[in-house]
Image (spheres, helix red, strand yellow):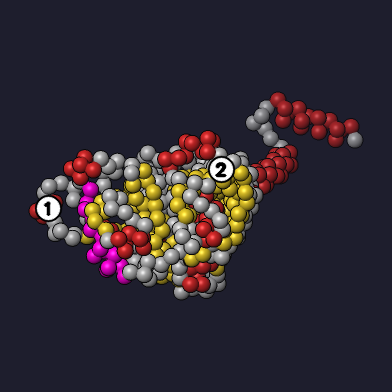
């Protein structure tokens, strides 16, 4: 027994004195322990890497698709030489890229309207790399929502959440396909950030003539190609549709915006049912951007016009009234009022708190359908004499806009039917900036019957708009 103990001590002494001499048994035992520890550490690290965001991305990614859109654009002259070498009506074929996501398994995909605007051909690339031809089922420029259909069933559907309970600072993820044509695979790009704000209203600027209302603001990177992709919460539930960014460079600077999912699905549902969207009409106009700085003094939004016999007229509203609240929402400016209207169905009731002089009264407006311009489009164009805004026209008329289509002459009947006035400058139709009189004619020619449009105008130095629908 003493000899065994001495042998063990001698063995330990040798091992301790010379690190080059190892016991095979001890090395094997140590190696097994180390492997066990390494395995446990690796499992722990692997578990920590499998975060909630990773799980959410895994849940959503199969429903995200890439869209390749082919369209034609009128070639804009860049130099005097273009007049000699290009035909007057020169066009070019262009390809655009965007994102969408499956919201119904029977091949229905939700995306932005500006992604598919003017599309002649749509190719939908599924998450597994399959390319399918897409058909534009319908679009709504006012809300910037469109629906594309592919001939495929049992597609993975994106989980749907709510935007109404989003908390400022909670984690969100933006899915998309930025610069998809440069990438070698079809997996969506995922960026993470937080909810920076909710209920953001964005004014028209430069190339973007449309309004974005009640938007979700996030610092998750949204870049070109992300438009139409889902914005999700940390559970992988879609809470918004990525739509726009504020950027001087064209890339993300941490100011991204998404359309609330409730609005997107409501519009998409109407498109699926009827191919278009019925725009709720309240029958009144309010003071626009020029009055935004005075809202604290006014205490609300001033009514500037009430359509005779329209919903607001029947509800007892008059010109000069001030709208203070609508359906419980405080109205600070015309964007707040537009946001309320945008989520209304035809026939919905709007309870408004109105200041009439010194009194606060409650009134109810029951919305109706947008009035239809009974004149044919060709008649409108014949009775609407337009002039392209040039530097000379701008100086002569004292216009703020350096481009657009000036209404030089308009017949009384068309003025009454459309709300357009002589001297107005058409600067945008839906989300398309207008640069010439010819563009107005081309857009009118391409309108489908009963397709609502929003016309943005410069009038008396301020930007206003009117909604039209031709039969």
Placement of 449 over or under 216, stated as above or below: below
Who comes first in sequence, dot 2 or dot 1?
1
Q: Residue furthest right?
A: 1
Residue 233 visible at all: no
Marks 2/1: CA distance? 59 Å
- The answer to which of 249 and 441 lies nearer the viewer is 441
Choose top left, top right, bottom left or bottom right for residue 419.
Answer: bottom left
Direction from residue 346 to residue 390 in the image, left or right: left
Percent of width and height locating residue 14: 73, 29
Percent of width and height locating residue 236: 60, 54
Q: Going 50% across and 70% down the picture, which residue do you hit?
A: 272
Q: In this figure, which residue is indicated by the disc labeled 2?
A: 357
Q: Confirm whether the magenta stretch covers residue 384.
A: yes
Choose top left, top right, bottom left or bottom right for residue 452.
Answer: bottom left
Report the span colored magenta: 376-389
Residue 169 visible at all: yes
Q: Residue furthest left?
A: 84
Query: Dot 1: within a 10 Å radius of its alpha carbon, few (fewer than 14), some, or many (20 or more) residues?
Result: few
Q: On residue 33, which mark appears?
A: none
Q: Going 34% across and 50% down the picture, which residue do you hit?
A: 457
Percent of width and height locating residue 79: 15, 46
- The answer to which of 468 and 72 lies nearer the viewer is 468
- SS assignment at label 1: helix
Q: In this figure, which residue is indicated by the disc labeled 1?
A: 83
Question: Could you tell me if the residues under marks 2 and 1 are in contact, i.e. CB atoms within 8 Å?
Answer: no
Q: Going 45% across and 68% down the picture, which residue do you hit?
A: 276
Q: Quadrant of the C terminus?
A: bottom left
- The answer to which of 45 and 348 lies nearer the viewer is 348
Query: Dot 2: within a 10 Å radius of its alpha carbon, few (fewer than 14), some, or many (20 or more) residues?
Result: few
Q: Going 43% across and 65% down the picture, which residue do you hit?
A: 371
């Amino acid at each position: 027994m003493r000899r065994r103990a001495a042998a063990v001590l001698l063995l330990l002494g040798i091992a301790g004195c010379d690190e080059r001499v190892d016991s095979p048994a001890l090395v094997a035992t140590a190696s097994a322990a180390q492997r066990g520890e390494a395995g446990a550490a690796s499992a722990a690290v692997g578990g920590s890497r499998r975060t909630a965001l990773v799980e959410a991305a895994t849940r959503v990614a199969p429903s995200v698709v890439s869209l390749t859109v082919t369209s034609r654009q009128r070639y804009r002259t860049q130099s005097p030489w273009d007049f000699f070498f290009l035909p007057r009506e020169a066009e070019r074929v262009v390809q655009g890229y965007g994102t969408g996501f499956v919201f119904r398994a029977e091949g229905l995909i939700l995306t932005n309207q500006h992604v598919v605007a003017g599309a002649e051909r749509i190719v939908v690339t599924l998450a597994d790399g399959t390319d399918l031809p897409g058909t534009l089922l319908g679009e709504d420029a006012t809300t910037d929502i469109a629906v594309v259909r592919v001939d495929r069933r049992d597609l993975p559907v994106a989980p749907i959440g709510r935007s109404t309970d989003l908390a400022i600072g909670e984690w969100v993820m933006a899915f998309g396909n930025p610069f998809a044509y440069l990438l070698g695979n079809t997996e969506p790009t995922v960026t993470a950030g937080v909810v920076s704000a909710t209920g953001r209203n964005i004014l028209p600027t430069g190339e973007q003539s449309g309004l974005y209302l009640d938007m979700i603001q996030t610092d998750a990177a949204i870049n070109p190609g992300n438009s139409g992709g889902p914005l999700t919460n940390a559970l992988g539930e879609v809470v918004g549709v990525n739509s726009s960014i504020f950027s001087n460079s064209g890339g993300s600077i941490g100011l991204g915006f998404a359309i609330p999912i409730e609005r997107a699905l409501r519009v998409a549902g109407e498109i699926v049912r009827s191919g278009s969207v019925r725009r709720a009409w309240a029958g009144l106009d309010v003071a626009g951007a020029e009055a935004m700085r005075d809202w604290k003094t006014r205490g609300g939004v001033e009514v500037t016009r009430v359509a005779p016999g329209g919903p607001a007229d029947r509800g007892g509203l008059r010109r000069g009234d001030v709208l203070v609240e609508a359906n419980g929402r405080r109205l600070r400016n015309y964007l707040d009022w537009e946001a309320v209207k945008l989520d209304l169905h035809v026939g919905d009731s709007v309870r408004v708190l109105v200041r009439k002089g010194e009194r606060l009264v409650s009134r109810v407006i029951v919305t109706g359908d947008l009035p239809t311009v009974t004149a044919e489009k060709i008649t409108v164009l014949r009775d609407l004499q337009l002039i392209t805004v040039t530097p000379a026209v701008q100086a002569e008329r004292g216009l703020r806009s350096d481009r657009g289509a000036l209404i030089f002459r308009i017949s009384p009947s068309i003025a009454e039917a459309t709300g357009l006035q002589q001297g107005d400058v058409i600067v945008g139709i839906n989300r398309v900036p207008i640069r010439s009189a010819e563009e107005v004619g081309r857009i009118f020619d391409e309108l489908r019957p009963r397709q609502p449009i929003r016309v943005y105008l410069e009038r008396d130095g301020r930007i206003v708009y009117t909604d039209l629908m031709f039969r």
